[in-house]
């Protein structure tokens, strides 16, 4: 018996559990790509597996559906690899440790990978189902979505010819997404110099922030640990003389950073330094405690000696960039109430031997404003003598006024649930933008089961919702 067997339907959750045994972080997708491609070949299906580890499975129509329009299902094979600070999990080798928490599937100490493992599990269940009824289908499983949609970028789109695309990369049952923001990744790289400084070494740790998806949760007033640490260092600068030895925060540009650690060197004694940091903690808790209830900030002396710290000019340049770089929601949509139009996230900060690197994720449903945000970061970088580079740009998926697929979804939803679904546009980026850009006649929607806190170790997949959405999907593909 497997963990979710009593809740399962047509082995959807079984396949999700099997996927969870395979390490599949972004950039480490060969094993999971081989697994799903081999699974499809074992079922006698035509499979294309490319050099980027993308997989396309061609599923013939079942009896009675031969004349129907072809449908594509699409999701991504990779997952975000985040874990609790004290978790020993190795994402390169260890299987996820799944457990059930009040009707929701979770992983011990790590992200779950429901984003987007549930889409792959749906496709595997469809392949495996000997009783399935459906038209001809293309099952597209892409790679490295979470780090720049590189698989979808590299994909040979001429291998696809479906009329309809159902993307399964959304996290709210009852929502039919019909458009999304475009985005890009941007790095600022600052050359730095260091001096040997003698004094007391202190470690300042900020952790326990909620974090989250930098598209879905960017509007929720959650603190970004990198920006917050910049605030701490800035405020401390007026209270004490110190030198910056190190700063490290975040792992992914598209996750709101939960933890950041800085190391400083000062002549102040431990009691004095701790008292100054405690003052800053008090201010931060007063400002943010209601929406960051688990926030923790500590300061500990770890050594006295001589350290290689940033020279004053390099420190001021780095701190200026960290403090002045915009973060969070930049503009709300003028056309759709409540929709974030443009945002950016400072996802990663790294101080290396001779450079400091700051990585951002930019999102916007308006291409010109996305470029404007990027230009602002470039301008800031150049003023500080830093270099700015961009990569992984993907277009917005624009809302279509007329959509037979969307109308069919709405009709079926009202019939099944007795209420209207939410048809909307999301601020998060989806591969739909790249696919619609290459295949402009493709009619697209994005759906998915209820998930929460994706891109964090608190990620949860609602088990009953996962089953309901698959049952709904079965009916939807039969009515098109």
Image: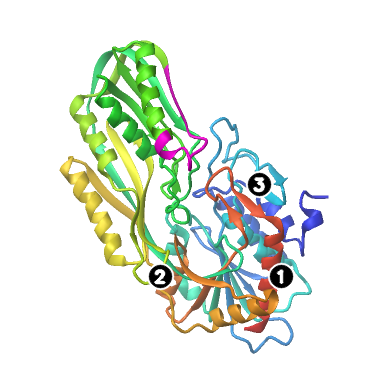
Mark 3 vs mark 2: in front: 2
Distance between mark 1 and mark 3 Cα atoms: 22 Å
* Rendered location of residue 355, percent (x, y): 28, 34
Quadrant containing the C terminus is bottom right
Q: Of 210 and 78, which appears nearest the observer? A: 210
Q: Earlier in the sequence, mark 1 or mark 3?
A: 3
Hey, which residue is sitting farthest bottom in the picture?
67
Residue name at image x 29 percent, y 35 percent: 356
Q: Quadrant of residue 188?
A: top left
From the top left corner, tell me how far across and down residue 350 is, in percent. 36, 35
Q: CA distance from mark 2 to mark 1?
A: 31 Å
Above or below, 69 against 11 in this view is below
Q: CA distance from mark 3 to mark 2?
A: 33 Å
Is residue 290 part of the magenta span, yes or no? yes
The reply, left or right, for residue 273 in relation to residue 141 is left
- Give the residue drawn at x 34%, y 20%: 276
Up-down: is 44 above or below 63? above
On the rendered structure, is 389 left or right of 96?
A: left
* Mark 2 lies on residue: 336
Q: Dot 2 surroundings within 10 Å: few (below 14), some, or many (20 or more)?
A: few
The image quadrant of residue 447 is bottom right
- From this viewpoint, is residue 156 visible? no
Q: Name the element at disc 2.
A: loop
* SS category of the residue bearing label 1: helix
Label 3 sits on residue:
106
Disc 1 residue crowd, few under 14, some 14–19, many 20+, Cα 10 Å:
few
Residue for point 33% across, 48% down = 327
Q: Position of residue 271 (x, y in %)?
A: 38, 12
Write down the residue under mark 1. 471
Q: Is residue 441 visible?
A: yes
């Amino acid at each position: 018996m497997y963990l979710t067997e009593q809740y399962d339907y047509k082995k959807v959750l079984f396949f999700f559990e099997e996927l969870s045994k395979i390490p599949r972080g972004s950039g480490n997708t060969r094993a999971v790509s081989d697994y799903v491609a081999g699974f499809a070949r074992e079922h006698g299906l035509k499979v294309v597996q490319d050099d980027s580890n993308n997989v396309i499975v061609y599923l013939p129509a079942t009896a009675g559906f031969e004349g129907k329009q072809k449908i594509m299902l699409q999701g991504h094979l990779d997952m975000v690899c985040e874990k609790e600070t004290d978790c020993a999990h190795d994402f390169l080798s260890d299987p996820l440790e799944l457990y059930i928490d009040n009707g929701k599937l979770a992983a011990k100490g790590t992200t779950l990978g429901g984003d987007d493992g549930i889409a792959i599990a749906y496709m595997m269940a469809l392949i495996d189902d000997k009783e399935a009824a459906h038209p001809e289908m293309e099952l597209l499983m892409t790679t490295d979505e979470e780090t720049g949609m590189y698989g979808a970028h590299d994909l040979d789109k001429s291998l696809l010819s479906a009329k309809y695309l159902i993307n399964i990369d959304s996290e709210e049952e009852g929502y039919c997404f019909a458009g999304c923001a475009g985005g890009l990744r941007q790095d600022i790289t600052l050359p730095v110099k260091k001096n040997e400084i003698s004094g007391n070494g202190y470690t300042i740790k900020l952790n326990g922030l909620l974090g989250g998806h930098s598209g879905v949760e960017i509007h929720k007033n959650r603190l970004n640990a990198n920006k917050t640490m910049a605030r701490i260092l800035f405020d401390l600068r007026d209270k004490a003389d110190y030198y910056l030895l190190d700063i490290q925060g975040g792992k992914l540009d598209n996750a709101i950073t939960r933890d950041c650690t800085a190391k400083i060197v000062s002549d102040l004694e431990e009691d004095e330094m701790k008292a100054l940091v405690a003052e800053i903690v008090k201010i931060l808790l007063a400002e943010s405690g209601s929406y960051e209830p688990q926030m923790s900030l500590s300061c500990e002396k770890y050594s006295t000696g001589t350290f290689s710290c940033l020279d004053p000019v390099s420190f001021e340049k780095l701190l200026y960039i960290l403090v002045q770089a915009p973060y969070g929601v930049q503009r709300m949509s003028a056309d759709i109430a409540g929709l974030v139009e443009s945002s950016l996230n400072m996802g990663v900060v790294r101080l290396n031997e001779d450079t400091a690197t700051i990585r951002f994720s930019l999102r916007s449903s308006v291409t010109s404003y996305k470029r404007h945000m990027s230009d602002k970061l470039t301008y800031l970088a150049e003023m500080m003598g830093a270099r700015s580079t961009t990569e992984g740009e993907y277009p917005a998926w624009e809302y279509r006024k007329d959509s037979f697929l969307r109308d069919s979804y709405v009709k079926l939803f009202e019939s099944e649930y007795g209420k209207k679904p939410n048809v909307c546009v999301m601020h998060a980026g989806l591969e739909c933008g790249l696919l619609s850009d290459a295949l402009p006649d493709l009619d697209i929607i994005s759906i998915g089961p209820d998930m929460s806190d994706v891109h964090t170790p608190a990620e949860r997949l609602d088990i009953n919702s996962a089953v309901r959405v698959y049952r709904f999907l079965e009916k939807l593909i039969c009515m098109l």
